[in-house]
Amino acid sequence: MASISLENKLAFVTGASSGIGRACAEQFAAAGARLLLVARRLDRLEELAIELNAKYDTEVYYLEMDVRHRDLVLQTLASLPEAWRDVDILVNNAGLSRGFDKLHTGDIDDWEEMIDTNVKGLLYVSRAIVPAMVERDAGHIINIGSIAGRHAYPGGNVYCASKAAVRALSQGLKLDLLGTQIRVSEIDPGLVETEFSDVRFHGDRDRAKQTYDGLTPLYADDIADLVLFCATRPVHVNLSEMLVVPTDQATATHVSRRG
Ligand code: NDP
Ligand code: 8X3
């Protein structure tokens, strides 16, 4: 199957300051794409833009953006410079987990943050970007879901629910776009070693490291590989969903740890 070129395509990656989003940005840059990158940590985006420009001569437009802020997202994306408006590939990656408490003892602020980022943030960004895709009858939305959206696990409750919502939204968007040439894909990773667990455990590094103790996790580049694979299929091929786990993981709750 011949792959399509990403040369001069515009890829928009949310949450590009770390982990999977950063790895996607680098792989898109290596493939010749132009990049629109957002996250809250502007300093990181700036460093990444400089690095990618030096390495691949990539044109990067980056913005500080908290995807939870509806007006900011809609206004900022509506007023992008002309050259940065027609997004070819949107990677809805910005997301996080907070806490590992049972639901009945959970921190309601953690819940709000997860739902506002993982669900509402994805919706705001998609609402801002997809109309221009529909007008051009071209484009690809790639949502980063999670194994957590397919199987809930103890302590995962609201995070799992937020990723189940991403799954429903990917399916719903595909249905709504049926009849257009726009593709919708969802990639659902298992354990990927990024800053994800540091964030989940509010900066408790020891607890975060335990998540990956004794197993070989996935790495951010493994997921970026799949994002690029989806994006480079011929336009008549829509890779709708992919579940990807480390070899040491079978389900959200079954992992093999050595030692
Ligand atoms: P990281 O913590 O390394 O990266 C998360 C990214 O999301 C950061 O760039 C962060 O940027 C951004 N982000 C978080 N909140 C916001 C916000 N409100 N507005 C804008 N950007 C935001 O984790 P991962 O790379 O692992 O996570 C990326 C995605 O992958 C998430 O959706 C996560 O749920 C999903 N995932 C992760 C798995 C894993 O095991 N790591 C497995 C399955 C799915 P900043 O803080 O600068 O705003
Ligand atoms: C992240 C993977 O299993 O920690 O979505 O929820 S898991």
Image (cartoon, helix red, strand yellow):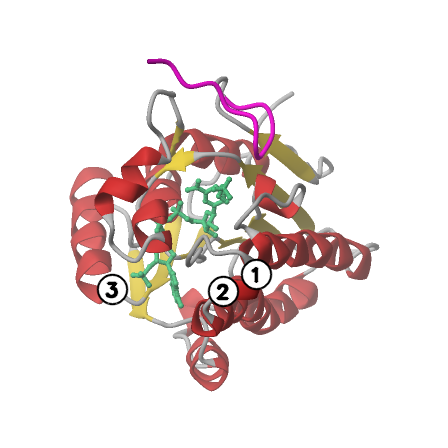
As drawn, the label of residue 103 is: 1
At label 3, which amino acid type do we have?
Answer: Arg
Q: Position of residue 29 (x, y in %)?
A: 34, 42
- The correct choice, above or below, for 242 with respect to 179 in the image is above
Q: Position of residue 54 (x, y in %)?
A: 16, 44
At label 2, which amino acid type do we have?
Answer: Gly
Disc 1, SS: helix
Residue under pointer 3: 41
Secondary structure mostly seen in magenta is: loop
At label 1, which amino acid type do we have?
Answer: Leu
145 and 61: which is toward the camera: 145
Question: What is the span of residues highlighted in magenta in the rendered image?
Answer: 249-259
Q: Nearer the viewer, mark 3 or mark 2?
A: 2
Q: Bin the neighbour count of mark 1 within 10 Å (Cα to Cα): few under 14, some 14-19, many 20 and up.
A: some
Q: Bin the neighbour count of mark 3 within 10 Å (Cα to Cα): few under 14, some 14-19, many 20 and up.
A: some
257 vs 180, left or right, is left
Q: Are marks 1 and 3 in contact (CB under 8 Å)?
A: no
Q: Is 149 a magenta residue?
A: no
Q: Are marks 1 and 2 in contact (CB under 8 Å)?
A: yes
